[in-house]
Amino acid sequence: MERGAALRAVRCRTGRPRTYAGGMYARRRRIYFLLMGGCLFLFVSAWSFVRLLSVEAAVAMCVVAMVIPPVAAMIANRRGPDDRWWDDPSGDPQSDEWWDELDGKRRHDE
């Protein structure tokens, strides 16, 4: 099975395929790679040619590059306003009912 095929194969209760997963992960990947590309650019340029002009500027660029990876992880993994990946139904009615009861969405009638 190719990568991501499991996400595309999952269907919601109405029978329509879930389309949000691909867009959500594409947005996250794009943001993460842009930030990490900027980090690599800062680090490589700091020690390839900026150090020839100013060592202090090269060190400052490396400090900024050092802060980018954790920030990139936090920004790329945040939940967007359209992202509904943990409260979507799983397809198992008993499990969905149990989770809804735990979340207070629906009361379990005895």
Image (tube, rainbow, N blue to C red):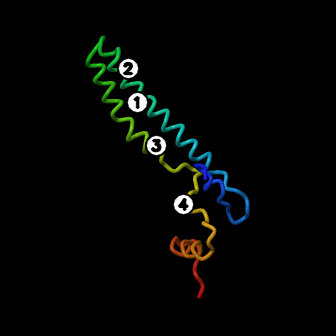
Which residue is farthest right? 15
Q: Amino acid at mark 2?
A: Ser
Q: Amino acid at mark 1?
A: Cys
Considering depth in this image, is 54 or 43 the residue closer to the camera? 43
Is 62 situated above or below 106? above
Residue at 52% over, 70% down: 103
Q: Secondary structure at mark 2?
A: helix
Residue 17: x and y, percent?
70, 56
Residue at 60% over, 49% down: 2
Q: Few, some or many C-alpha atoms within 10 Å of disc 4 (few <14, some 14-19, many ≥20)? A: few
Q: Amino acid at mark 3?
A: Ile
Residue under circle 2?
A: 45
Q: What is the C-alpha distance between the residues marked 3 and 4?
A: 18 Å
> Tags 2 and 4 in contact by the CB under 8 Å rule?
no
Is 15 situated above or below 68? below
Residue at 57% over, 41% down: 27
Give the mark nearer the N terminus: 2 vs 3. Answer: 2
Q: Amino acid at mark 4?
A: Trp
Residue at 65% over, 59% down: 10
Q: What is the C-alpha distance between the residues marked 1 and 2?
A: 10 Å
Q: Few, some or many C-alpha atoms within 10 Å of disc 2 (few <14, some 14-19, many ≥20)? A: some
Residue under circle 3?
A: 75
Q: Quadrant of residue 74?
A: top left
Residue 60: x and y, percent?
30, 24
Is 83 situated above or below 73? below
Q: Quadrant of residue 39?
A: top left
Residue under circle 4?
A: 86
Q: Secondary structure at mark 4?
A: loop
Which residue is farthest bottom? 110
Q: Secondary structure at mark 1?
A: helix
Q: Nearer the viewer, mark 2 or mark 4?
A: 2
Disc number for residue 39: 1
